[in-house]
Amino acid sequence: MKITMIGAGYVGLVSGVCFADFGHEVACIDKDAGKIEALLAGRIPIFEPGLEQLVADNVKDGRLSFTTDLATSVSQSDVIFIAVGTPSRRGDGHADLSYVYDAAREIAAHVTGFTVIVTKSTVPVGTGDEVERIMRETNPDADIAVVSNPEFLREGAAIDDFKRPDRIVIGLNDERARSVMTEVYRPLYLNQSPLLFTTRRTSELIKYAGNAFLAMKITFINEMADLCEKVGANVQEVARGIGLDGRIGAKFLHAGPGYGGSCFPKDTLALVKTAQDHDSPVRLIETVVSVNDNRKRAMGRKVIAAAGGDVRGKKVAVLGLTFKPNTDDMRDSPAIAVIQALTDGGAVVTGYDPEGMENAKRVIDGITYADSPYKAAEGADVLVIVTEWNEFRALNLDRLKTLMNTPILVDLRNIYQSGEVTKHGFTYTSVGRPE
């Protein structure tokens, strides 16, 4: 099939290259000429394990192309995916749908023959209805079916998630789109990946409900971690004890500094706003948003407490800046709020991240950056692990102790056990565990 992917960002690029790898002919469109130029030169604008090689292979085989020419690609396509950004709108927290609606207008002007238009971007309930209205208003003769097909990709594991999904959700109001979408996902369908066909509005809500539930699990275990610290319990054992219950499950029960990234913060907020607009408030999710926002800053205060209650003039080394490992994404990373709390307290902060340094420099001012964990630790009074990159799991603690001014380690991801750190002469603080 001929597929056009509008938007060559994270979702569009990963989805486009995976569809090409299935054997479809895919054109990725983006208005950012610099991004398209970089992709044509083989430079990938995001860090995602395995993506660079997959792009190169499919470009070489002629199934994947990159262009700014929307008109030509759209007019030749069977299926057009809209995968543009839907950031939180400034001022009110609603999802900004302007890019989605602009894409709909442009597509409508150039579409020919029966074409399936698929919203891949994360959008509030009812967006598909508006996309269809805009397209029919722009081009009353357009023969289209508008479909919702939300993505469920984890940054750092996106290619595997796309090719081995838990489920594929397809929301449609026009039955003609069913066979087309089945053909788009045929390689997965043949491997018995569940295709869940539902209505368009239900599909749109599934995406938000799923992310909100996972965000709620993270926030729940974080609050349990705080309680564990007060009563002398171990949050990791609590998580294991409840996670073994099949009704609960072990995933997303890892205490830490709160969730961040491109999805959970904006999607929980958008769901809250959508629910309020429909006079059906989601109080649980409102609380999740509030607790998570406060938690990130609280983790900065936790570091200050570990340093004796005062960090003015002290050097703090922060390891891990991205919101999670195996990505260079800094969006809503807990490290931003942690570092802000530390600098507000007068600390001198040095940061290090294996992949996120360039993006971090765009959003975190007033700190210095090191090129290794050990460089960051030189002369430090406190060392803080904020993101659980694998290279931080086996740090040479003896070497760190010789480099640091004061051997204090604050582990906000619980990747070490207290005993293995304190035996090297460190003072150790973690989250939700008796020290």
Image (tube, rainbow, N blue to C red):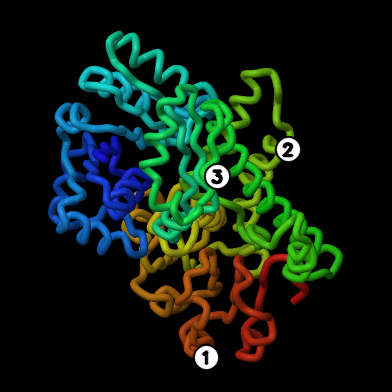
Front one among 84 and 329: 84
* Amino acid type for the residue under numbered disc 3: Phe
Image-based side of 337 in relation to 12, left or right: right
- Pointer 2 or 1: first along the chain: 2
Q: Are marks 3 and 1 in contact (CB under 8 Å)?
A: no
Q: Quadrant of residue 308?
A: bottom right
Task: Check disc 3 and report the residue beneath it.
Answer: 264
Residue 368: x %, y % from top left: 37, 63
Q: Quadrant of the N terminus?
A: top left
View extreme (right): residue: 231
Q: Which label belongs to residue 42?
A: none
Residue at coordinates 30% horizontally, 26% vertically from top-left? 115
- Mark 3 → mark 1, Cα distance in angstroms: 38 Å
Residue 419: x %, y % from top left: 69, 86
- Pointer 3 or 1: first along the chain: 3
Q: Quadrant of residue 272?
A: top right
Q: Secondary structure at mark 1?
A: helix
* Amino acid type for the residue under numbered disc 1: Asp
Mark 3 packing: few (<14 Cα in 10 Å), some, or many (20+)?
A: many
Task: Check disc 2 and report the residue beneath it.
Answer: 284
Task: Check disc 1 and report the residue beneath it.
Answer: 398
